Image: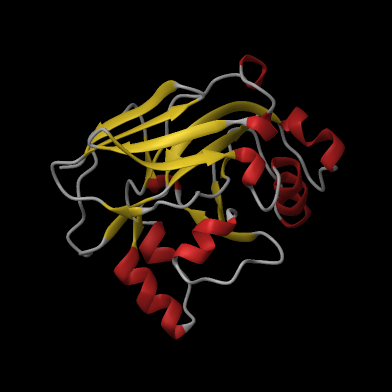
Amino acid sequence: MKMICVGRNYREHALELNNPVPAQPLIFFKPDTALLRDNKDFYYPDFTQDLHHECEIVLRIGREGKSIQKDFALDYIDGVGLGIDFTARDIQSVAKEKGHPWTLAKGFDHAAPVSAFVEPSSLPPLHDLRFRCELNGEVKQEGHSADMLFSIPDLLAFISRYITLKKGDLIFTGTPAGVGPVQPGDRVTAYLEGEKMLDFAIR
């Protein structure tokens, strides 16, 4: 299982961090050791002083695909959930200044809390999904998949041109504006179409 992540897929998020809006999907990875399931507590790492939440729609791949055509892309998805792309913003900023990869900022242990998955057929069309992230009960992020710069079919077609997708792979589709810092003692909750998907504490 691999986690393939998309950066800057919402215009307002790119702008809030003073980043250019990409002309094609910006792809990075998280290792399987970053996965955190079952709403287990997240423990604040000791190597960062500026950890940010980034809530995203996460897709689970249901069968192997290479060079997937956009018209058939949705047939490769067997689950939809939410995830948090935790980012050590201070580490990422240094890496960006030096032109280095973001791996340490985004790929550390448990940097990817992921919810349970629901079947796509039980949801509205995937181009019309709404989700939100709350910190201590206060809404911080609200997203709508219609606002993605690169749609879900676009993402699967682009990624699978370079990287074969296999059953069980997860795709983080990008975060909307509103990212911000978390601290020990905080509680993160996230909702997909009004259903609570994530609810965990930061220790």
On-image quarter of the C terminus: top left
Residue 6 higher or lower than 189, as above or below:
below
Q: Residue 72, percent across and down?
A: 83, 34
Residue 39 seen by the camera: yes
State the count of labels.
0
Residue lying farthest to the bottom in this orientation: 98
Residue drawn 61% across the image and 19% down it: 119
Residue drawn 49% across the image and 42% down it: 56
Residue 119 higher or lower than 191, as above or below:
above
Between residue 175 and residue 102, name the one nearer to us: 175
Q: Residue 165, percent across and down?
A: 68, 43
**Colouring scheme applied when the structure was drawn:** secondary structure
Using residue 114 as the reference point, say whether residue 46 is left or right of it.
left
Using residue 65 as the reference point, say whether residue 130 is left or right of it.
left
Between residue 105 and residue 57, name the one nearer to us: 57
Q: Residue 130, percent across and down?
A: 55, 32
Residue 40 seen by the camera: no
Between residue 183 and residue 156, name the one nearer to us: 183
Residue drawn 71% across the image and 66% down it: 23
Picture quarter containing residue 41? Answer: top left
Residue drawn 85% across the image and 42% down it: 69
On-image quarter of the N terminus: top right
Q: Residue 175, percent across and down?
A: 50, 49
Residue lying farthest to the top in this orientation: 122
